[in-house]
Image (cartoon, grey):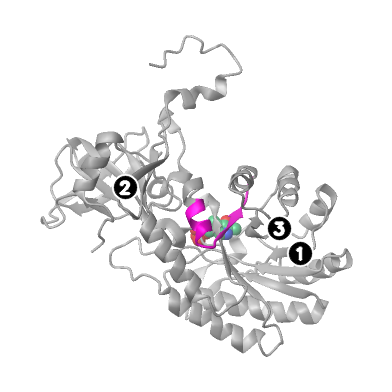
Amino acid sequence: MKKPFITLDQIKEITKEYPTPFHIYDEKGIRENARRLKEAFSWNKGFKEYFAIKATPNPYLIKILHEEGCGVDCSSYTELMLAEALGIVGDEIMFSSNATPAEEFVKARELDSYINLDDFTHIDFLDKVAGLPDTISCRYNPGGTLEISNTIMDNPSEAKYGFTKDQMIEGFKILKERGVKHFGIHAFLASNTISDVYYPELARILFELAVELRDKTGVHIKFINLSGGIGIPYRPEEKPNNIMVIGEGVRKAFEEVLVPAGMEDVSIFTELGRYMLGPYGHLVSKAVHEKNIYKNYIGLDACAVDLMRPAMYGAYHHITVMGKEDKPHDKMYDITGSLCENNDKFAIDRMLPKIDIGDYLVIHDTGAHGYSMGYNYNGKLKSAELLLKEDGSVQMIRRAETPKDYFATFDFSDILKNMKYD
Ligand SMILES: *Cc1c(COP(=O)(O)O)cnc(C)c1O
């Protein structure tokens, strides 16, 4: 059974000050998880996690992760700005973008961040717009399908990212000629893997590539970035990944491939988003309508604007009806938001206890790719974000949007001068 990290009593207390819907994050869970990851890779001297900002771009949360030793993975101008404002610069930033605008490369160079090139043509592009740094990383796409123990994990040949192997070899030669001294290798081959073998398998592919690249081009490989992709158990029947087993699996590949090749100085980097924060966020919402036609619907005060994954991917998010955990789950509902979009459903045909208007519903695992994917369709405003601190107190870490925020992009004109904001 999936259990929320907050109780009904806590929710009742919080809603006296902050109305639903809101996202809330669990500081204790975040810190403990970050420490476990660090421990799992403590065998590697240069290990560093670069938290993928896009998963949850909240400065308070990034600061917590930074305190736990994490850097950041940025892939846009505003993500670089956020890192800079938090004093996270230089080799604590991995700029891992694609189809990159020139001004983003310029900014990344200005912050002296690591740059992970997505394409062979970006060598010339970066050289022209911002110059080449001393250390550079290239993203690898092996093509084909990624199969692990006879299961197809993903289809790299369909992914827009990365260099082919020939391009990696040619690219490293060109970069070396142009004075680049140290190299990184990056790949992201499968997303949300519930498997302790994905990372070790990916590591082995990249370690073997690293040896080949070193042998064929003579470059110094400084780091290997295993990127994102470690998943979380969204469904109650799924088994969580064991990060210690994953760390050990990567170590085994390291010792079998890199150490014999004399490359034991290679640092292992990760760029996890979902794994770092996913389970430590809840979307808290209230049942405001019940409707019975051909199916039974419960309408919430949250909608896909607050959490898009179910609408976008048909993703499962577990729901707890607070205070009714032990009641029989004998009613089948579609749990919906208020958008004029029939995909605005947090759950379809979900067996839940009987829901009454005013019940609080916790939607689980919204800590990554939750708030951040939100949008403003139907003129819906984005919710607040709160932090449940280690001492049990609650802090607002982002206020809810107001209509003024929504109309702010017309502030160049007086066409809305009669808008009434109270
Ligand atoms: C999204 C992304 C990540 C994080 O992915 P998760 O699935 O959240 O771990 C890491 N690196 C890059 C380049 C990404 O685009």
Looking at the picture, does residue 271 appear above or below residue 25? below
Gap in angstroms between the C-alphas marked 2 and 3: 39 Å
- Disc on the earlier residue, 1 or 2: 1
Marker disc for residue 299: none
Q: Secondary structure at mark 3?
A: strand
Magenta includes 418? no
Name the residue carrying label 1.
135
Residue 157: horizontal and vertical position, in percent? 61, 65
Q: From the viewer's perspective, is 105 left or right of 417?
A: right
Instruction: Give, as a three-letter code, the residue at label 2.
Output: Ser
Residue 361: horizontal and vertical position, in percent? 24, 46
Instruction: Give, as a three-letter code, the residue at label 1.
Output: Thr
Instruction: Give, as a three-letter code, the residue at label 3.
Output: Ile
Q: Which residues are magenta?
A: 62-76
- Disc on the earlier residue, 3 or 1: 3
Residue at figure coordinates x 58%, y 76% from the top left = 203
Residue 236: horizontal and vertical position, in percent? 28, 64
Q: Nearer the viewer, mark 1 or mark 2?
A: 2
Instruction: Say whether mark 3 is within 8 Å of ligand 1.
Output: no
Name the residue carrying label 2.
393
Gap in angstroms between the C-alphas marked 3 and 1: 8 Å
Looking at the picture, does residue 245 appear above or below residue 415? below
Name the residue carrying label 3.
115
Residue 299: horizontal and vertical position, in percent? 25, 37
Find residue 18 and report its image quarter: top left
Q: Name the image quarter holding the C terminus.
A: top left
Foreground: 198 or 46?
46
